[in-house]
Amino acid sequence: MSSDSAPMNLTHHFLIAMPGMQDETFSRSVVYLCEHSERGALGLMINKPSDINLRVLFEKVELHLSNPAFGEGPVFQGGPVQTERGFVLHEPVTANAPDSNESVYASTMTIPGGLEMTTSKDVLEAIATGAGPRKVLVSLGYSAWEHGQLESELAENSWLTVAADPAVIFDTPVAQRYDRALALLGLEAWKLSPDAGHA
C-alpha cells in the first residue's frame, strides 16, 4: 500500500490562506482545524475579530463577567456557517477524577493534539465566574468543507498547512497571527506569490 493512498488528516493543523485567496471571508485567514476526516473538515478562523467584544456577547446570553477586563477581548468570526452560534476553543478542562480525560462541559469535541471546542452554554457560565478555562477563543460561526472539498482546495494551492501551535491562538496578538503561522513554516507573506499555481 503506497503512502499516498492513506487519507489525509489535518486535525489540529492550521490552514493558512495563500495571498491570492479571492474569497473575502478567508482572505489572509488562519483556520484552526478541529476535525478532518473522510466526511469533511471543520475549523475556526483565529485571526478575524468580529465587530462585537466578549462583554456584548456575555450580555446577550445574560451572563455577568466577574472579570471586566476579559470582556474587552474580541469575539471572532469563526467562519460563514451558523454565524449566530457560539463556539469556544479552549485548553482542556477535565473532570476531577485522576484518570479522567472526559471534558467537564456538555457539548465538547476533544481535539487530538490537546485542545477542546465546546458549543454548550456551560463553558460560558464557567468563564463568566472565572472558573472556566484560562486560554479561550470565542467565535461566532465556523468554517466547514464537505467530503473532498478541502483536499481539492489544497490541490489548487489555496492553502498552506502546518501543525498547529496553541501559542499562536492564545498568546499572539491578533494582527500578528497570520505572520506567526507562516513563520511556523519558515515563510514570510511577502515571499509568497499572490498567483496560485495554475498551469
Image (tube, rainbow, N blue to C red):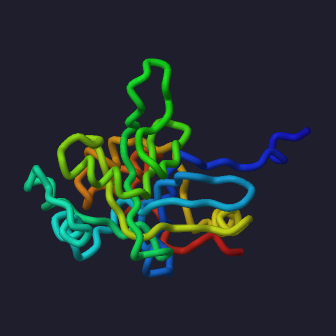
- In percent of width and height, residue 107 lies at 48, 52
Q: Is residue 73 left or right of residue 6?
A: left
- In percent of width and height, residue 156 lies at 66, 69
Q: Is residue 164 above or below residue 99?
A: below
- In percent of width and height, residue 53 lies at 20, 68
Q: Is residue 183 left or right of residue 17?
A: left
Q: Quadrant of the C terminus?
A: bottom right
* Residue sitting at the far left: 68
Of the pair 99 and 113, the residue shown nearer to us: 99
Of the pair 164 and 147, the residue shown nearer to us: 147
Q: Quadrant of the N terminus?
A: top right
Of the pair 50 and 164, the residue shown nearer to us: 50
Of the pair 39 and 95, the residue shown nearer to us: 95
* Residue sitting at the far right: 1
* Residue sitting at the far top: 98
Residue 131 makes an appearance in the image: yes
Q: Is residue 73 above or below residue 165?
A: below
Query: What residue is drawn where x is 47% and y is 75%?
Result: 82
Locate residue 77: give its quadrant. Answer: bottom left
Q: Is residue 8 above or below residue 39?
A: above
Query: What residue is drawn where x is 33% and y is 41%?
Result: 167
